[in-house]
Amino acid sequence: MSVAGKHAVVTGASRGIGRAIAERLHQEGARVSIISRSAPLAAVEGFYARADVCKEDEVRRAFQECRDANGAVDILVNNAGIVESATLTRTSSEMWDRIIATNLTGTFLCTREVFAEMTAAKWGRIVNVASTAGLAGAPYISAYCASKHGVVGFTRAVAAEAAATGVTVNAICPGYTETDILRNAVTNITAKTGRDEEETRHLLAASNPEGRIATVAEVAEGVMMLIGGSQTGIAMIVPGFLPA
């Protein structure tokens, strides 16, 4: 399915996975709008609206700005997210609330913003960027795991609600991916454990499907597969494009 001429909104696309997705959509001919708290680090073709996705009023305003610039929303990629690590006993209420608000509540607010117009149009594509941490547990990231499990559950619930409307709702679940988040994780782990960088990267890669670090281009390709298909309610694991 071609996305040429369709209006795609990507949240959290100032860098990393979101940026790669926005660039790929633009290359395929979509009219791209980016919603994020900060402007892209380098120029990305498309309209930019500033918003914190966990703030309802900012989300509503940003989406209206995107519609004013590019028309009704056909495609939404909920990519905005944060990760912080701590043992359970060191996970503060503030950290928990911050992660849940951005990763899960932000996905809810942005999806709700476009759901009515997509179902009325009898066509739409929503892809939520979750994580393999949304399918299995991992130590020291309990809040992050909870938020991403929530995203996967939310995806499946909305997919069921949208059944037979022409709107598909799917999640993509990347493992460790070559981004600033990965590089920061490697730095933190090496500092705390004394392992060298190569050993740390090898350990992280071993926990991924196919035993390697994913690339942002692979995640963007997975998103395009979900947009182009008719499947709904699935969680695609990357690398490897494995359905879950």
Image (cartoon, grey):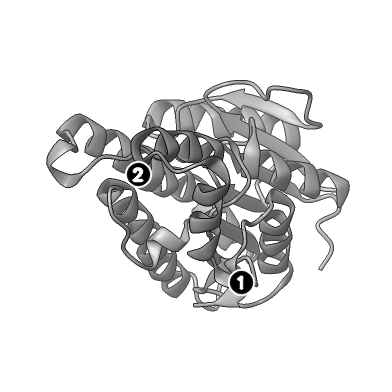
Of residues 117 and 12, the one nearer the viewer is 12
Closer to the chain start, of discs 1 and 2, is: 2
Above or below, 144 against 224 in this view is above
Please identify the quadrant where the N terminus is shown: bottom right
Mark 1 — residue?
Answer: 210
**Pointer 1 local density, CA inside 10 Å: few below 14, some 14–19, many at least 20:** few
Please tell me which residue is depicted at 35% across the width and 67% down the height of the picture: 136
In the image, residue 120 lies at what x, y percent?
58, 60
> Which residue is at 81% across, 32% downward?
45
Q: Are marks 1 and 2 in contact (CB under 8 Å)?
A: no
Can residue 171 be seen? Answer: no
Q: Please indicate, yes or no, whether residue 148 appears anywhere in the rendered image.
A: yes
Horizontal and vertical percent for residue 166?
62, 71
Image: 213 above or below 1:
above
SS label for mark 2: helix
Q: Answer with left or right where residue 157 lies relative to residue 30.
A: left
- Residue 130 location (% of width, % of height): 47, 56
Q: Which of the two discs, 1 and 2, sits closer to the camera? A: 1
Q: Amino acid at mark 2?
A: Thr
Foreground residue among 30 and 238: 238
Tally of marks: 2
Relative side of 64 to 60, left or right = right
- Give the class, few, some or many, for how many residues have Cα within 10 Å of label 2's Cα (few <14, many ≥20): many
Residue 145, image quadrant? bottom left
Q: Give the residue at mark 2.
A: 105
Q: Amino acid at mark 1?
A: Glu
Residue 40's x, y, as percent?
67, 25
Q: Is residue 229 left or right of residue 184?
A: right
The furthest residue to the left = 89
